[in-house]
Amino acid sequence: MPLVLQSYDIAGLSPRAGLEFWHDIVCRSFVPLECAPQQSGFRGAVTRLALDSFSVSTVRSSAQSVSRTRRLIGSSEGTHYLLSLGVSGRGQVLQDGREAVVLPGNFALYHSSRPYTLRFDRDFEQIIFMLPSEALNARFGHAEHLTATLIDTSNPLAALTRHFLTGLMATTRSMPDMLVSKLTAQAAELVATMLIATGTRSGAPTSHRMAMGLQIRNAIETRLRDPDLGRRALAEQFRISTRYLDDLFADEGLGVAEYVMKRRLEWARGALSDPSRDRYQIGEIARMSGFVSQAHFSRVFSAAYGCAPRAYRNSRQERLALPE
């Protein structure tokens, strides 16, 4: 999981070449987009820190409009959430029939699977945190109801998230893959927590349902190693019916048991990728993931990731042993 810093600037290029390069920069740094500068003498620069499938970028630009169209969505692979943090200037985020005006210190969320438009009527600077949909969904559930919703300084986690992303953007030193993985997980957790605070303060009719779903997901994370964790145990813990529990997970496209299995396997894969856990045997990793049987663990892990747990760990160790 390399940490890669990339910097792009159209300074010094002819107007035509600069606009063509800017379009390429934006699409390469984020997702395929259409860019429409709003003035002559356009300027633009992007500094992007890539952290495996995550990234944090600083964008400085003249006035422009950026659109994610249905045609571009159809040609893309994978989906992502993007979180914009205003540093200077003013921006608008329009998605799902909502609009958020992003001023310095404020955030707005948008999603790459549906059309959106970003408008900037003057010079601006923003920090944009981009993360895979599944990374946020696993911690928060689906956040479609919070796209193009202003997250301002009244949110108790806004300042902490701003400091974290600003500090992350300033990272220039290389670090081990293990630390990159932990750093991206912490960033996703912090963003999810900020969104939780946004949802509970919104007063929306879905707030209770959302809060219940979040509590259950947190309980799953806490009890992953408990082999008795399952659909009925969760329903009893939260004093709800199994039917309502299933309904809370309907948006995941997975049943509760499948979701628990998915999180156990993801935890186990992370543990097998972590050199600090090499002292644990495969059977111990299985039990720490909530599996009673090592054989069952090996079977479902192989089905999910295409190789046995031991082979997965060995391949990581072999890669680390290769000379630079």
Image (cartoon, rainbow, N blue to C red):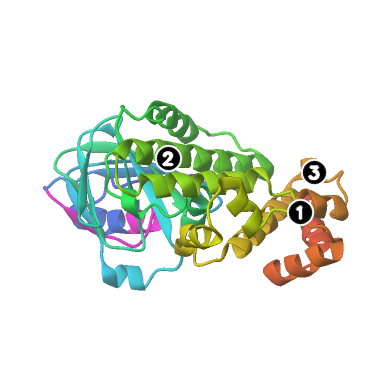
Q: Where residue 161 sits in the image (x, y, percent)?
A: 43, 32
Spatial CA distance of label 2 from label 1 is 28 Å
Residue 227, numbered circle: 1
In-front residue for pair 144/318: 144
Q: Which amino acid does label 3 sit on?
A: Arg
Disc number for residue 277: 3
Q: Kindly identify the amino acid type of the residue bearing the numbered disc 2.
A: Ile
| Distance between the alpha carbons at the discs numbered 1 and 3 | 21 Å
The stretch of residues the image draws in magenta is 24-38
- The residue carrying mark 2 is 196
Whether the residues at callouts 2 and 3 have beta carbons within 8 Å, the answer is no
N-term-proximal mark, 1 vs 3: 1
Q: Is residue 250 above or below residue 266?
A: below
Residue 184: quadrant of the picture: top right
Q: Which of 167 and 262 is in front in this view?
A: 262
244 lies above or below 12: below
Residue 5 rendering spot, x and y as whole percentages: 50, 43
| Amino acid type indicated by mark 1 | Pro
Give how far apart the Cα atoms at labels 2 and 3 are: 31 Å
Query: x%, y% of residue 202?
Result: 30, 39
Does the magenta run of residues contain 41?
no
Residue drawn at point x = 78 percent, y = 48 percent? 288
